[in-house]
Amino acid sequence: MSVRQIRLFGDPVLRSKCDPIVPGDPKAAALIADLIETVEVPGRAGVAANQIGVGQRAFSYNVDGVVGYIINPVLAEVSGEPELVDEGCLSVPGFYFPRMRYPYARVTGIDLDGNPVELAGDGLMAQALQHETDHLDGHLFIEGLEPTAKRDAMRLIRQSEWWA
């Protein structure tokens, strides 16, 4: 397996809702291995399958030294008063923008064997769970910015070296 290239904002795969993975799908193990290797690159907290060009519902995470994955995640619970946090994205490299996120999140899904998986946490883990689930639903974090911040963010993104 390998570290995969991250798709950048503007790539249509990032705007498409990902399809569920059928438990036991032989291609799923290779996808998960690639997601794990890709998220292990230093400085990465999460990678959604569509960020590596695969329109299937899975993501990997790397938070506080714990690396893992979940298949077919569903955002089951968020709680607390939403907080303004600086958020970045591998698909929007080099930028962090203030965005509202819940301080606690919980997702449910399955592992490669079809066993139930539940991930929950606060702080960075909560942010990652919300962020990666959004990716799988075809949403980028900049969509959740306040209108003025979003306008400013889009201006900066269009001026970046990587913008096509």
Image: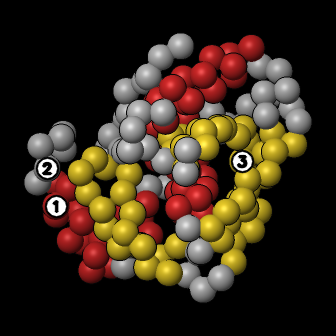
Whether residue 50 is visible, yes or no, is no
Vertical side of 1 occupied by 50: above or below: below
Which residue is situated farthest in the right direction here?
Answer: 115
Q: Secondary structure at mark 1?
A: helix
Which residue position is annotated with label 3? 73
Q: Are marks 1 and 2 in contact (CB under 8 Å)?
A: yes
The image shows residue 10 at horizontal and vertical percentages of: 32, 44
Spatial CA distance of label 1 from label 3 is 32 Å
Residue type of the residue flagged with mark 2: Ser
Spatial CA distance of label 1 from label 2 is 6 Å
Residue type of the residue flagged with mark 1: Leu
The disc placed on residue 156 is 1
Q: Secondary structure at mark 2?
A: loop
Pointer 3: residues within 10 angstroms few (<14), some, or many (20+)? Answer: many
The image shows residue 145 at horizontal and vertical percentages of: 38, 72
Vertical side of 158 occupied by 17: above or below: above
Q: For residue 76, what is the image quadrant? A: bottom right
Q: Secondary structure at mark 3?
A: strand
Which residue position is annotated with label 2? 160
Q: For residue 123, what is the image quadrant? A: bottom right
